[in-house]
Image (tube, grey):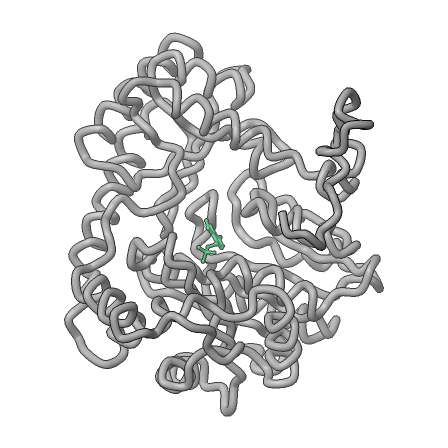
């Protein structure tokens, strides 16, 4: 403590008996978020010995060597300081070219992000006033439900059971005068469902009619086991396209993604980034140049392996579980057999050392469970065997 500083209240002798409990200072918006479903699975994972962990939302491969090398070189070359808020120009340029080529957009704005998550938050901050409504499909990625509430907006989940497809009529029915934003996620977390050109065209029509902005979360675009379809080309003035490097290159901890969209919106998101995330991690931005400047990174063999894993799970469980065929990501969302809830089924699986996530974490229903097949083949096979055994004994 310096001579000029005042003693901290907790160190002053008069108050030592009374230890202040800060719990009462926690804001309602924090208390309103219940992360207990996922946390329970993580806590269990820490306790189980060598579990068959089918709950993990990230790839099981490591970052490709050339990217690692570029990261190390960037750090050693002193690329460790703040970058411009919108990202380094060397990275923005090839991304813009790629976005223009794939969407046909003429002059998109690009913002480099601290992961796609930052893009979800910043687009909501840029687009939503308190009371505005955000539509997204149920089952959903958890952030879609919780982040709108942080800014006083209203999350509205549109049911997609039992097939998890995009039903344009249900989206149309959920629109009110307060609806501003529609979030799409294809390939989907948690269902693995991929949207078709026909489905996207139907929803683009609705977005045009009601002047909605569409946030297209395409973080799993590389894990698409047929051609990846995006709504972006259909809505040049009304779409924010989010893409990430986390899943594609196994670099979830590097925190890198980008948003592409109309310049006026991207500028607002960039301004908000300046006062929140500041910029995406500098070394990760420089490392990502590798992807645009050389062709040393080829993810095709890995994506092929993931396609085989998908087939292994879907084929392996087909006898006991109802499954909507997943076209992408690395998730399957089977229905729980019999009358039990997903939470009960997951508890049975945990008893047999298999970790899953119950549907209620991603949905208003608790009838399905999420399997992540981003795990070695041997473990995956064992996991499938155990799930079938449980189904036989509980159906
Ligand atoms: C659908 C979806 N969007 C966004 C993210 C966030 O990814 P990141 O912030 O690592 O780019 C995830 C991560 O699980 C996800 O599943």
Residue 19, given in percent of the width and then of the height, sits at 75, 25
The residue shown at (83%, 57%) is 131
Residue 371, given in percent of the width and then of the height, sits at 39, 34
Q: Nearer the viewer, residue 311 or 274?
A: 274
Q: Along the horizontal axis of the image, is 234 left or right of 209?
A: left
The quarter holding residue 97 reads bottom left
The residue shown at (43%, 21%) is 44
Residue 154, given in percent of the width and then of the height, sits at 77, 52
Q: Along the horizontal axis of the image, is 169 left or right of 79?
A: right
The quarter holding residue 142 reads top right
Residue 10's place in the image compared with 289, above or below, is: above
Q: Nearer the viewer, residue 335 or 178?
A: 178
Residue 53's place in the image compared with 105, above or below, is: above
Residue positioned most to the top: 393
Residue 325 visible in rendering: no
Q: Along the horizontal axis of the image, is 89 left or right of 39?
A: left
Residue 376, given in percent of the width and then of the height, sits at 21, 36
Residue 139's place in the image compared with 213, above or below, is: above
The quarter holding residue 127 reads bottom right
Residue positioned most to the front: 3
- In the picture, the quarter occupied by the C terminus is top left
Residue 373's place in the image compared with 148, above or below, is: above
The residue shown at (42%, 66%) is 281
Residue 14 visible in rendering: yes
Q: Nearer the viewer, residue 197 or 328?
A: 328
Q: Along the horizontal axis of the image, is 392 left or right of 280?
A: left
């Amino acid at each position: 403590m310096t001579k000029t500083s005042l003693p901290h209240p907790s160190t002053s002798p008069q108050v030592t008996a009374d230890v202040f409990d800060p719990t009462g200072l926690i804001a309602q918006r924090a208390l309103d978020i219940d992360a207990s479903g996922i946390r329970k699975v993580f806590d269990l994972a820490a306790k189980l010995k060598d579990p068959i962990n089918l709950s993990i939302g990230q790839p099981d491969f490591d970052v490709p060597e050339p990217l690692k090398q570029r990261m190390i070189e960037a750090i050693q070359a002193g690329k460790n300081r703040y970058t411009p808020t919108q990202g380094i120009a060397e990275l923005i340029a090839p991304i813009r070219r790629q976005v223009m080529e794939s969407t046909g957009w003429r002059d998109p704005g690009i913002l480099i992000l601290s992961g796609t998550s930052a893009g979800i938050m910043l687009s909501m901050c840029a687009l939503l006033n308190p009371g505005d409504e955000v539509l997204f499909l149920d089952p959903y990625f958890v952030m879609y439900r919780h982040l709108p509430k942080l800014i006083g907006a209203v999350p509205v989940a549109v049911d997609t059971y039992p097939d998890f497809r995009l039903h344009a009529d249900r989206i149309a029915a959920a629109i009110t005068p307060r609806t501003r934003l529609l979030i799409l996620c294809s390939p989907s977390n948690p269902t693995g469902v991929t949207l078709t050109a026909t489905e996207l065209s139907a929803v683009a029509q609705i977005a045009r009619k009601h002047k909605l902005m569409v946030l297209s979360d395409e973080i799993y675009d590389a894990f698409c086991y047929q051609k990846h379809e995006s709504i972006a080309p259909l809505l040049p003035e009304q779409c924010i396209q989010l893409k990430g490097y986390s899943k594609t290159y196994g670099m979830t901890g590097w925190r890198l993604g980008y948003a592409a969209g109309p310049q006026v919106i991207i500028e607002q998101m960039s301004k908000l980034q300046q006062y929140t995330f500041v910029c995406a991690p500098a070394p990760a931005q420089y490392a990502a140049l590798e992807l645009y400047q050389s062709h040393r990174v080829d993810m095709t063999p890995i994506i092929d392996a993931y396609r085989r894993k998908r087939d292994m799970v879907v084929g392996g469980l087909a006898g006991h579980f109802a499954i909507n065929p997943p076209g992408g990501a690395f998730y399957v969302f089977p229905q729980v057999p019999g009358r039990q809830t997903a939470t009960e089924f997951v508890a049975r699986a945990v008893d047999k050392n298999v970790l899953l996530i119950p549907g209620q974490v991603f949905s208003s229903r608790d009838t399905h469970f999420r399997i992540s097949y981003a795990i070695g083949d041997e473990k995956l096979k064992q996991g499938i065997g155990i799930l079938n055994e449980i189904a036989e004994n509980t159906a």
